[in-house]
Image (tube, grey):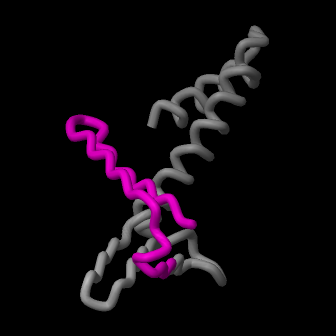
Amino acid sequence: MSSLGFLLVGTSSYLGNPFFPQGIVMSFYGIAGLFISCYLWCTILWNVGSGYDLFDRKEGIVRIFRWGFPGKSRRIFLRFLMKDIQSIRIEVKEGVSARRVLYMEIR
């Protein structure tokens, strides 16, 4: 919401009687902030990046599925044989900015 405030203050400064050059800069920051917040809300609503990892020892297959942005390639589905995997590393960081990363090295 602060980006909308920047845009309103910048526009009113630009249109006001005593013109302040900072109004153009504030308007630019407001527009940039609106684009960034719109992008972030779209990634949340479309559930971009969510999915699952499946390590099936019985069949010897690893499956990785993720949702991408809407379009032709929205579904990202990777499938590997376990014998082709050289190493796996998983990083999990809990806290305010939780992060889970899976690193795989394939032959």
- Answer whether residue 89 is magenta in the image: yes
Q: Residue at point 28% right, 43% down?
A: 98
**Residue 8 position by quadrant:** top right
Q: Main SS type for the magenta part?
A: strand
Which residues are the magenta region?
Answer: 78-107
Above/below status of 50 relative to 3: below
Task: Establish if 75 lies above or below 69.
Answer: below
Question: Considering depth in this image, is 104 or 97 the residue closer to the camera?
Answer: 104
x%, y% of residue 30?
62, 32
Measuring from the top left, give residue 58's x and y in whole percent: 25, 88
Quadrant of image for the C terminus: bottom right
Residue depicted at 51% across the width and 78% down the height: 78
Q: In the rendered view, tell whether residue 96 sits above or below residue 83.
A: above
Q: How many marks?
A: 0
Most distant residue in the bottom direction: 59
Position of the N terminus, as image quadrant, is top left
- Kindly identify the residue that appears in the image at 27 percent across and 46 percent down: 92
Q: Is residue 100 left or right of residue 33?
A: left
- Residue 18 rendering spot, x and y as whole percentages: 75, 8
Of 96 and 77, the residue lying toward us: 77
Q: Nearer the viewer, residue 106 or 24?
A: 106
Residue 59 picture location, percent across and down: 32, 91
Q: On the image, which quarter does residue 45 sit in?
A: bottom left
